[in-house]
Image (cartoon, rainbow, N blue to C red):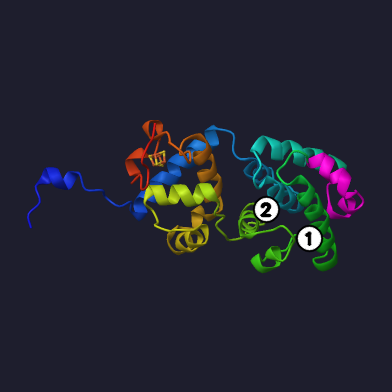
């Protein structure tokens, strides 16, 4: 069947592998112009992997500013696992308040510190399997620690990464687990470690969960806007 050129020009063009290179270049530039997420800043400062691990665990369901202030208060009391074990659960909870689930996380801080000393000579382990064996450490935290604290290989998939990768049309997945698998299969390795930081910053600033700012988005021309029903 013959399609008129006008009709063809209105067909969506799926995002291709070359586009992701441009998207990453543009969004990396945006990340450098703004304030990067706290864990990214810790990583760039070459912060100790133990402190990156603890701060990452604290950061789940917690705003960036709260995570940063809570982490700084905690690390001013104890900067390594040995010192941390000398603090009571109550003292840790007070230091990290008001991060989400601060009482449970205070217990995790102690259990992680004890585990590191007893099983890993006080060091943060470098394998995904060992990281996942630590209390309160899920795949998202483990991937972030692997890539940002230990220069390892991984892609940290959180809600921003999952949402934006699908909106862009780069992948088509239903869950973060599927997204991690799909990105591992097609995202060039040189972007693995930065991908989370870039997408988190873009997701907070522009590609918001509800009504994204498409009108001022620097990667608009590459985006399929899959599933976007209303935008600003
Ligand atoms: S164009 Fe809209 S949906 Fe696409 S990345 Fe930008 S803000 Fe998100």
- Mark on residue 33? none
The quarter holding residue 225 reads top left
Q: Give the residue at mark 1.
A: 123
Q: For the N terminus, give its image quadrant.
A: bottom left
Percent position of residue 175, x then y:
49, 58
Q: Is residue 95 left or right of residue 35?
A: right
Q: Quadrant of the C terminus?
A: top left
In the rendered structure, find residue 149 and report the number of the disc placed on it. 2
Question: Would residue 117 appear left or right of 157 to someone viewing this image?
Answer: right
Residue 226 x/y as whole percent: 36, 48
Q: Residues within 10 Å of mark 1 (few under 14, many from 20)?
A: some
The correct choice, above or below, for 8 with respect to 134 in the image is above
Q: Main secondary structure of the magenta part?
A: helix
Task: Please report the bounds of the magenta region as a residue range.
Answer: 78-96
Regarding residue 27, the answer to whether it shows in the image is: yes
Q: Callout 2 environment at 10 Å: few (<14), some (14 to 19), or many (20+)?
A: many
Q: CA distance from mark 1 to mark 2?
A: 12 Å
Task: Give yes or no for contact between labels 1 and 2 (Cβ–Cβ under 8 Å).
Answer: no
Residue 83 percent location from the top left of the image: 89, 50
Q: Secondary structure at mark 1?
A: loop
Q: Is residue 49 magenta?
A: no
Q: Quadrant of residue 72?
A: top right
Residue drawn 79% across the image and 66% down it: 120
Q: Is residue 126 visible?
A: no
User: Disc 2 on helix, strand or loop?
Assistant: loop
Q: Nearer the viewer, residue 36 or 114?
A: 114
Q: What's the residue at 59%, 34% (across, down)?
A: 35
Assess mark 1: CB under 8 A from ligand 1? no
Reply above or below: 148 against 63: below
């Amino acid at each position: 069947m013959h399609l008129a050129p006008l009709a063809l020009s209105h067909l969506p063009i799926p995002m291709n592998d070359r586009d992701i290179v441009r998207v990453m270049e543009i969004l990396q530039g945006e990340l450098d112009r703004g304030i990067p997420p706290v864990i990214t800043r810790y990583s760039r400062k070459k912060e100790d992997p133990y402190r990156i691990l603890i701060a990452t665990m604290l950061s789940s369901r917690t705003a960036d500013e709260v995570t940063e202030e809570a982490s700084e208060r905690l690390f001013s009391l104890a900067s390594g696992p040995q010192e941390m074990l000398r603090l009571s659960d109550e003292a840790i909870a007070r230091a990290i308040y008001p991060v989400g689930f601060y009482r449970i996380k205070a217990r995790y801080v102690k259990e992680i510190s004890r585990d590191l000393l007893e099983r890993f000579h006080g060091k943060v382990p470098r394998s995904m399997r060992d990281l996942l064996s630590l209390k309160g450490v899920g795949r998202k935290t483990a991937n972030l620690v692997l890539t940002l604290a230990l220069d390892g290989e991984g892609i940290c998939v959180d809600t921003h990464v999952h949402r934006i990768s699908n909106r862009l049309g780069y992948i088509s997945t239903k869950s973060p687990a599927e997204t991690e698998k799909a990105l591992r299969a097609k995202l060039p390795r040189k972007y693995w470690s930065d991908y989370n930081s870039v997408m988190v910053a873009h997701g907070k600033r522009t590609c918001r969960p509800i009504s994204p700012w498409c009108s001022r988005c620097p990667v608009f021309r590459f985006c399929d806007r899959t599933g976007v029903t209303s935008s600003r």
